[in-house]
Image (spheres, helix red, strand yellow):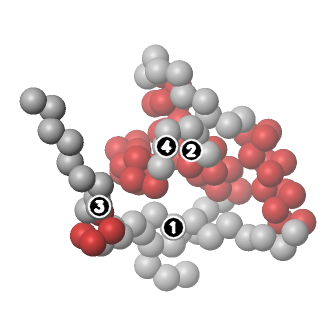
């Protein structure tokens, strides 16, 4: 595997998919949570213990989705490499003035 790729156990992969499948967790927050909590499992626990209402997919749901994908020949390739180019990061929307 190339840079940014990591070999995960089945349980780690399920946790990664649960974390990235959580509403309002995008790629940047995902990477930040992994850096802060060292694992997707630790990140999920932190979210659940935060008092906020995160809708984290269940292990059972993700396992079923993963099995269905694998039956169709789909293989997950985990990666935390995240590159945002300046041209993409800048908004093309006009700024609003409030006052």
Residue 51, image x, y percentages: 46, 17
Q: Are marks 4 and 2 in contact (CB under 8 Å)?
A: yes
Residue labelled with disc 2: 19
Q: Are marks 3 and 1 in contact (CB under 8 Å)?
A: no
Q: Residue at x 40, y 47 (%)?
A: 29
- Residue 41 vs 6, above or below: the answer is above
- Residue 95 vs 77, above or below: the answer is above
- Between circles 3 and 2, the one closer to the viewer is 3
Residue labelled with disc 4: 25
- Between circles 4 and 2, the one closer to the viewer is 4
Q: CA distance from mark 3 to mark 4?
A: 23 Å
- Residue 4 vs 93, above or below: the answer is below
| Residues packed near mark 2 inside 10 Å, few (<14), some (14 to 19) or many (20 plus) | many
Q: CA distance from mark 4 to mark 2?
A: 7 Å
The image quadrant where one finds the N terminus is bottom right
- Give the farthest residue toward the right: 71
Q: Is residue 94 left or right of residue 16?
A: left
Residue labelled with disc 3: 92
| Residues packed near mark 4 inside 10 Å, few (<14), some (14 to 19) or many (20 plus) | some
Q: Quadrant of residue 41?
A: top right
Circle 2: element type: helix
Q: CA distance from mark 2 to mark 1?
A: 13 Å
Circle 3: element type: loop
Q: CA distance from mark 3 to mark 2?
A: 30 Å
Looking at the rendered structure, the number of numbered marks drawn on it comes to 4
Evaluate whether residue 34 shows in this view: no
Residue labelled with disc 1: 79
Residue 4, image x, y percentages: 44, 72
Circle 4: element type: loop
Q: Quadrant of residue 93?
A: bottom left
Q: Are marks 2 and 1 in contact (CB under 8 Å)?
A: no
Q: CA distance from mark 1 to mark 4?
A: 15 Å
């Amino acid at each position: 595997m190339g840079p940014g790729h990591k070999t995960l156990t089945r349980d780690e992969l399920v946790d990664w998919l649960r974390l990235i499948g959580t509403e309002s967790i995008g790629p940047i927050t995902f990477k930040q949570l992994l850096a802060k909590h060292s694992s997707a499992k630790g990140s999920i626990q932190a979210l659940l213990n935060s008092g906020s209402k995160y809708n984290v997919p269940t292990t059972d749901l993700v396992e079923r989705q993963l099995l269905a994908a694998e039956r169709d020949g789909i293989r997950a390739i985990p990666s935390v490499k995240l590159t945002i180019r300046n041209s993409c990061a800048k908004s093309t929307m006009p700024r609003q003035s409030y006052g």
